[in-house]
Image (spheres, rainbow, N blue to C red):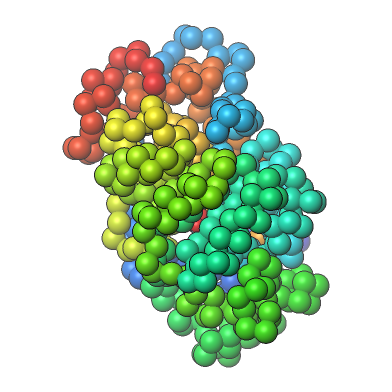
Amino acid sequence: MRRRRYYTGRDFHRAINIEELRGVARRCLPRFSLEYLEGGAEDEVTLRRNRSVFEEIAFLPRTLVGVGQRDLSTELFGTRIALPFVIAPTGLNGMLRHRADFSLARAAKTAGIPFTLGTLGTAKIEDLVAEVGPVWFQVYNMRAREFWERLVQRADQAGCPALLVTSDAPVFGNREWDVRNYAAPAKLTFRNKLEVLLHPRWLLDVMIRQGGPRFENLTEILPKGDTRAVKGAKYVTAQLDPTLNWDDVRALRKLWPRALVVKGIMTVEDARTALDLGADGIVLTNHGGRQLDGAVSPMEILPEVADAVGNRLTILIDSGFRRGADIAKALALGARAVLLGRATLYGVAVGGEAGAAHALKILRSEFDRVMALLGCTSVRDLGPHLVRWPTHTDRPSSLRHMQGTAGMR
Ligand SMILES: Cc1cc2nc3c(=O)[nH]c(=O)nc-3n(C[C@H](O)[C@H](O)[C@H](O)COP(=O)(O)O)c2cc1C
């Protein structure tokens, strides 16, 4: 009996790690919704690499340093946050759970970390800020330029402390599960309709209580202002502007008064350009393996980027982070904080705000324990001297020299 409750998701708090939370989500969501959350592009090579890369990086712990008091906080764009985590922008969260953006934002606020609302989010930016307080905002490149600018101005007026411009989606990645799950635009296959009926709790929560997810920030550009995601998803995809380029980042820099972050950087050259154009930060990311299949993991380029721009630009990173140890590895190699995508989505999908909070609690506890076992009392203590990466041949000089020494970032 207990086991069944666990499988239906009510007992999500018994999940002791993110992988177990994922197991609960797999049972709670209908197949097309789960694949939306989990899937990667094409053969999902990037998706798998995002996880396997962490196994190659091993820790070199220090010992006998006294770790009774540990400070997990860090500073991000002039604000102290309780943990080096940020909830990543993910569109269509309302497909997973009623008011999922609100739940994620509240869980983030309670944990003392930022939440990022996406352009394709299912909460209206003004409503979210009024209800929960300031959140970060992410913009996609929209063909309707005046609308794009207005969106940025709305985020400014709402007082968002940071704007992320996503640069790795000039077109959407080839997500084949999406093709398979729909018989025609907005029409699920027969099998998926059946799946919906087999998940009555999801049906009630997402489709009946909420009336289905809506692109709440896109009313102006959707035909007849119909924000229903089921109707508008294909139309919205076609509104992404593939001409997005560095001039747009330059324009955003003039438009946006607070922290500007380019999300989608994967090379040292692009990191340098972002810096030259006045960005405050970058997110090293391959979009969680949903865009270009066959890309490297951002962890593989982190040391070089940190070497080149780390002391002048805030480096954030995401893609594949599921353990506190993964986060510690990224911070050791030069990232200031980690964006969480699917890890907190699993949580919100199974338990709303409490589920997202549970995911954050797991990661916090793992990260804290790893810090202690590494001999660190503050995130500033994490440095390249604490990791070894035998198969990474392009390690920059700073990393090679610091291996096994007591050097600090
Ligand atoms: C379901 C889903 C939707 C996403 N939607 C967006 C989006 O609208 N905008 C964006 O910049 N990134 C989006 N991303 C990418 C995330 O911001 C982040 O880069 C990625 O999830 C990190 O990988 P992880 O899920 O393995 O942690 C999405 C990711 C997922 C899983």
Quadrant assignment, res 407: top left
Q: Looking at the rendering, in which quadrant would you find the N terminus?
A: bottom right
328 in relation to 323, above or below: above
Which residue sits at x=42%, y=56%? Answer: 248
Name the residue: 39% across, 21% down.
409
Q: Nearer the viewer, residue 270 or 403?
A: 270
In the rendered image of this protein, does residue 111 appear above or below residue 153?
above
**In x, y percent, where is residue 184?**
52, 90
219 left or right, relative to 190: right
Horizontal and vertical percent position of residue 362:
62, 40
Q: Residue furthest left?
A: 393
Regarding residue 39, the answer to whether it shows in the image is: yes
Of residue 98 and residue 228, the one placed in the foreground of this image is: 228
Q: Nearer the viewer, residue 41 or 388?
A: 41
67 to the left or right of 174: right
Along the line of sight, the residue nearer the viewer: 372 or 257: 257
User: Would you say residue 271 is visible in this rendering?
Assistant: no
Residue 334 falls in image quadrant: top left
Q: Position of residue 307 (x, y in %)?
A: 30, 30
Q: Is residue 157 left or right of residue 330?
A: right
Q: Residue 36, image x and y in percent?
A: 53, 69
- Residue shown at the point (71%, 41%) measured from the top left: 109
